[in-house]
Amino acid sequence: MPGTQRNGLLALGGIALAAVLAVIGHVVVNDDLDPWSLTVSDFAVSDRGGVIDVAMALLAAATAVLIPALWRTGSGSEPGGSRPGGDGRARSGRTRRRLRVAGVLLAAWTAGLVTAAVVPTNEPGLPMDTAAYLHRYASVVAFLALPVAGWLLAGHLGGRTAGWLRALTLASLLLAGAMVWSAYPGDRLLLGLAERLLIVTEVTLLAVLASSLILTGRSWSRGSTQSACITTDRAPQLHDRRVTGGGVTPVRGA
């Protein structure tokens, strides 16, 4: 399916560009900021509208491109597939429900990223206001929604992709727990490091999803080509059978 492969390539390109911009954003901001204890949002608010905000928006756009392509993988339109029976229809229904839930979670991740990019947190050292709380909880929703979506999609995509997605999901949840501990009882100990490791893990999860779509699109394209070749090869044989079966019956007494 060319559209699936195209979406995967666009998403992977957007993810790579967002990662580059995020690194640049850490290099160009104030040197007094400590990446070990301060979050990415603290860096972004020091450069409002800068490359880190652009990177978050770009990552959201890349995810939005993935969602319809993932839904297409559950449409049952894979070349060479047969019409499912009763059990097949039940599995297909479960797959579609799983994909819908995963799509909603990916949309929540996207919305959380956009909100975090548009609504800034407070400057480091200042008390939190309404915007800062909105920024925080939008980030929490995003950080939790993506790994759950990855876990749901692991069962659908299967193979090595499933193993990677499950491992990255578990790592994300562990790092999210480390962030919660650091933010409250840990007195922000290495909070910035924990958050950056979490972001790297979740961005890697997105990249795995995009790569899986690229491979799926190539596989479906090859399947379509092979199906067309088989149909072309069988056409003359079917024609010969029709001619042989419908031969002329000789006239009696001739």
Image (tube, helix red, strand yellow):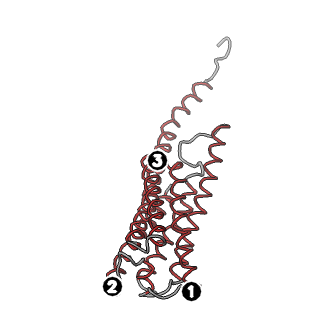
Secondary element at tag 2: helix
Does residue 18 appear anywhere in the picture? no
In the rendered image, residue 125, in percent from the top left (x then y), is placed at 45, 87
Q: How crowded is mark 1: few (under 14 residues within 10 Å), some or many (20 or more)?
A: few
Between 73 and 91, the one lying in front of the other is: 91
Q: Which of 85 and 163 is in front in this view?
A: 163
Tell me the residue that label 2 is attached to: 28
Q: Where is residue 135 in the image (x, y as percent from the top left)?
A: 54, 79
Of the two numbered discs 2 and 1 in the rendering, the one whose residue sits closer to the viewer: 1
* Mark 3 Cα shell of 10 Å, populated few (<14), some (14-19), many (≥20): few
At label 1, the amino acid type is: Asp
Q: Mark 3 points at which residue?
A: 225
Residue 161 visible from this viewpoint: yes
Task: State which quadrant residue 199 falls in.
Answer: bottom left
Is mark 2 in CB contact (under 8 Å) with mark 1?
Answer: no
Q: How many labels does the image show?
A: 3
Task: Give the x, y percent position of residue 238.
Answer: 55, 32
Q: How crowded is mark 2: few (under 14 residues within 10 Å), some or many (20 or more)?
A: few
Residue sitting at 39 percent across and 72 percent down?
Answer: 189
Residue farthest to the top, as pictured: 253
- Asked if the residues shown at circle 3 and circle 2 are in contact, with their CB atoms under 8 angstroms apart, the answer is no
